[in-house]
Amino acid sequence: MHVEFDRDTCIGMFQCVEEWEAFEENRDEGKADFAGSEETDPDLFVREVPEDAELDAEFAARTCPVDAIRLYDDDGEQIV
């Protein structure tokens, strides 16, 4: 399972921060930061989800008001 975070789409509501500790507030830029992720394209960050964080990752993706967080299963199918 992996997560893609489109930081350009992020509007800084920081609801993801409440759901998963991998997301951190960056008040200076008004966007969330995604710890442990790799920037694969400009402002697109990707990270594998540890098994013990799968539920947190799902909640983070579901609470994002602008769908900047997308969750994919191991087959590449989008879950959220």
Image: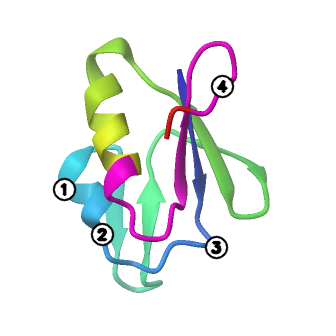
**Secondary structure under the numbered disc 4 in the rendered image:** loop
Q: Residue at x 65, y 25 (%)?
A: 77
Location of residue 2 with respect to 17 vertically, above or below: above
Residue assigned mark 4: 77
Residue assigned mark 2: 14
Number of on-image labels:
4
Q: Which residues are magenta?
A: 62-78
Location of residue 9 with respect to 45 vertically, above or below: below
Dot 3 amino acid type: Asp
Dot 1 amino acid type: Glu
* Mark whose residue sits in front, 3 or 4: 4
Question: What predominant SS class does the magenta segment belong to?
Answer: loop
Dot 4 amino acid type: Glu
Residue assigned mark 3: 8
Dot 2 amino acid type: Phe
Residue assigned mark 1: 18
